[in-house]
Amino acid sequence: MVLKKIVHLFFVITGGTLGYLYMPKIIGFLDFTDAKWVSSPYLSSVLGAIILFLISYWLADYVVGFLRWIEDGLIKLPAGDLFFGSLGLIVGLVVAFLVTIPLVDIQIPFVSKVLPLFLTIVLGYLGFQVGFRRREEFVSLLNLGRKERDKKKSIPEEGNENTIPMPKILDTSVIIDGRIADICQTNFLEGTLVIPQFVLGELQHIADSSDVLKRNRGRRGLDVLNRIQKELPVKVEIYEGDFEEISEVDSKLIKLAKVINGVVVTNDFNLNKVSDLQGVPVLNINDLANAVKPVVLPGEELAVQVIKDGKEHNQGVAYLDDGTMIVVEEGREYIGKKIEVLITSVLQTSAGRMIFAKPKLLEKAL
């Protein structure tokens, strides 16, 4: 209970100071007695210390509880947030000191005493808020300045430039998908993998879901992260910060990519498009999967098995071994049969590859 003893000591010192300064005036104003020893400042100091010491037994628990609450809040803050908040507070207090210097000399009680205190509190608070809430921009500026200095210091030889790979920020969908672990194992993905804390929180929320399918997806994502961190030769960093003013996880990912100059790794088609619109580089796992699929060109022939009907009239649907969908025109009557088809066109997007074909028998009949 060291903190409680410190609080008691603070009350005693405060009581002694207030008693020394104001107790003789109070006794003289109330005219309790004419004895001079009663109005002695030293005796008044002792009386003030005793009075506030007794009061401290009633207030100490509340003060200690309040200090514990502040302490818990500060401990939970990330180190970067606390640093920039404290830096902003210091700047605000310095500005308040400079602003209030001329006010102290003014012989108006409110202006010379109350107003400087008010400005100190307000500017200190505003400084802390600016430093805390705009920390990402400050970090970005510091990184930009460091990069400019590094460029000036290092003059690479022609044709032999050393570039540091941009950090890769994983989103929730690509972690649950699981293919990112296989890509990392093949060393095709360079640089540090950044896993934001808010993505981990979303994964944990999915893993704790009452829905069995969602729960399994969340646990699969956590298993994938565990494999990447412990088994694969890649550097993994956890980003502890958060963007409290932003509610959507996708928007937080885009903001983080701008702050740390990183690349978003995803297989979410919508996140891909939004990132492109905001000028944030994206690596889409589906694009990579489509790029390494066997090339199928119009005019080629394939043997496929039609397994179901399509959305349009008289269409059939088949699949390649890698999962690519083939829409077979006039193929509904061949459902359940293996036939040869002629490729007519290929449509490739970030959402996947789609192949259109028609039965070869129909081509011969024409």
Image (tube, helix red, strand yellow):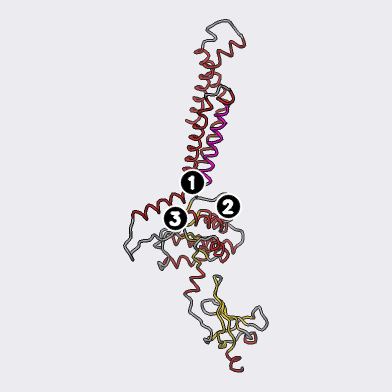
x, y percentage for residue 147?
40, 54
Write down the quadrant of residue 188 in the picture.
Answer: bottom left
Instruction: Give the residues drawn in magenta, as a range.
Output: 113-133
Which residue is disc 2 drawn over? 246
x, y percentage for residue 242?
52, 50
Task: Name the residue type under label 2.
Answer: Ile
Dot 1 or dot 3: first in sequence order is 1
Nearer the camera: disc 2 or disc 1: 2
Magenta stretch, main secondary structure class = helix
Task: Name the residue type under label 1.
Answer: Pro
* Residue in front for this viewpoint, 44 or 112: 112
Q: Secondary structure at mark 1?
A: loop
Residue at 56%, 70% in the rendered image:
351
Please tell me whether residue 118 belongs to the stretch shown in magenta. Answer: yes
Image-based side of 312 in relation to 194, left or right: right
x, y percentage for residue 110?
59, 25
Residue at 56%, 19% in the rendered image:
51
Q: Secondary structure at mark 3?
A: strand
Callout 2–callout 1 Cβ contact below 8 Å: no
Which residue is disc 3 drawn over? 237
Which residue is disc 1 drawn over? 78
Task: Name the residue type under label 3.
Answer: Glu
Callout 1–callout 3 Cβ contact below 8 Å: no
Dot 2 or dot 1: first in sequence order is 1
Label 2 crowding class (10 Å Cα cut-off): few <14, some 14-19, many 20+? few
x, y percentage for residue 181?
46, 65
Q: CA distance from mark 3 to mark 2?
A: 22 Å
Query: Looking at the image, which residue sits at the far top?
Result: 34
Label 1 crowding class (10 Å Cα cut-off): few <14, some 14-19, many 20+? few
Residue at 42%, 51% in the rendered image:
145
Q: CA distance from mark 1 to mark 3?
A: 15 Å
